[in-house]
Amino acid sequence: MLKLGIIGATGYVGAEIVRLLALRDDIKITTVVSNSFAGQPFSNIYPSLRGIYDNICDTLDMDEISEKADYFITALPHGVSASVIPGLLEKGKRVIDHSGDFRFRDVKVYEKWYKVTHTAPHLVSSAVYGLPELYRNEIKTASLVADPGCYPTCSILGIAPALKNGIASHQDIVINAVSGVSGAGRKSELAYSFCETDENFKAYGIGNHRHTPEIEQELSLICGKPVIVSFTPHLAPLKRGMLVTSYLNLNSQLSPADIHSLYEDYYRNEPFVRILPLGQFPETKYVAGSNYIDIGIAVDHRLNKLIVISTLDNLGKGSASQAVQALNIMAGFEETKGLLTPGLYL
């Protein structure tokens, strides 16, 4: 029985992880850490879990919680993770982190975009970027896995086949992305209140969103050339869900059928990547509540551009369920265990 601790458990990501794992027969959540709700039953904060997971929330006492679990998933703000994770690793724990602290190969890039000084730069080189479709073998033996951001997951997986196979240019890539409000986390800021988000649609982080260099890093590694993207995120009046439209310049005249076949081949053995038939395109309601990413492609023949539409659940494949996928790999479980649930649709 794998003993798991979740630090930062009462945010939306933490709660989704509890929901996904509470009834597993091979994993036991032995500690849920939340300084804001310490001493309260988890099911008091999320009543949907009453009778399913009623454990009391712990405070962040490293010695105490380390005795309770062998694996930890951290869902903490950037900067905070880097102060907590070294202590867990020193105690021999294996960790999956949701912050941006360990996603970057270059500490200077992280510090520039996140505007903080990294407090554990010695761990960056050993951290594995937690995208199973790209780093499955590395995840298997990793002590520290950095769960990707939701925008990067949706963007990278949509673009990867085109760059890896050299059919599209690594230059002048444009990414327009839309996320549900839960992507901002469980917070009470005015910008995310009901009256501000309902029946509203807006762009934000224009030209300076922190996920931009994460996307660029991974796409550069995929094609072996420096990639710079124009990335614009938007906020939609959805609770959960994400849709990304990526525009790439094709290197030659290719038919949609040829490109579609290439995408199918690239993801043929990936259980959570679904390439839609030509002429069909993803919608958020098909993946909300699931660990699937749906991808559709089209070609604008006038401009010789490849248009890729990709969609996932920002709380699912974009964070919590992707962490569970990585946990399954690390622990030697069937990778798909507990994750083959279809989207909610309604």
Image (cartoon, grey):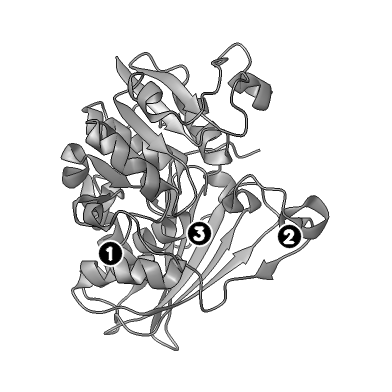
> In this rendering, does residue 271 appear at all?
no
> In this rendering, does residue 30 appear at all?
yes
The quadrant in which residue 338 appears is: top left
Q: Which mark is residue 191?
A: 2
Query: Which amino acid type corresponds to the residue marked 2 in the rendered image?
Result: Ala
- Number of the front mark, 1 or 2: 2
Q: Quadrant of the N terminus?
A: top left
The quadrant in which residue 104 appears is: bottom left
Query: Which amino acid type corresponds to the residue marked 3 in the rendered image?
Result: Phe
Looking at the picture, does residue 258 appear above or below residue 313?
Answer: below
Q: In the image, residue 65 lies at what x, y percent? A: 39, 24
Q: How much space separates mark 1 and mark 2, taking CA atoms?
A: 36 Å
Q: Residue at x 24, y 50 (%)?
A: 128
Label 2 environment density (alpha carbons within 10 Å; few <14, some 14–19, many ≥20): few
Q: What is the tally of numbered marks visible in this picture?
A: 3
Residue with the mark numbered 1: 161
- Number of the front mark, 1 or 3: 1
Looking at the picture, does residue 184 appear above or below residue 218?
Answer: above
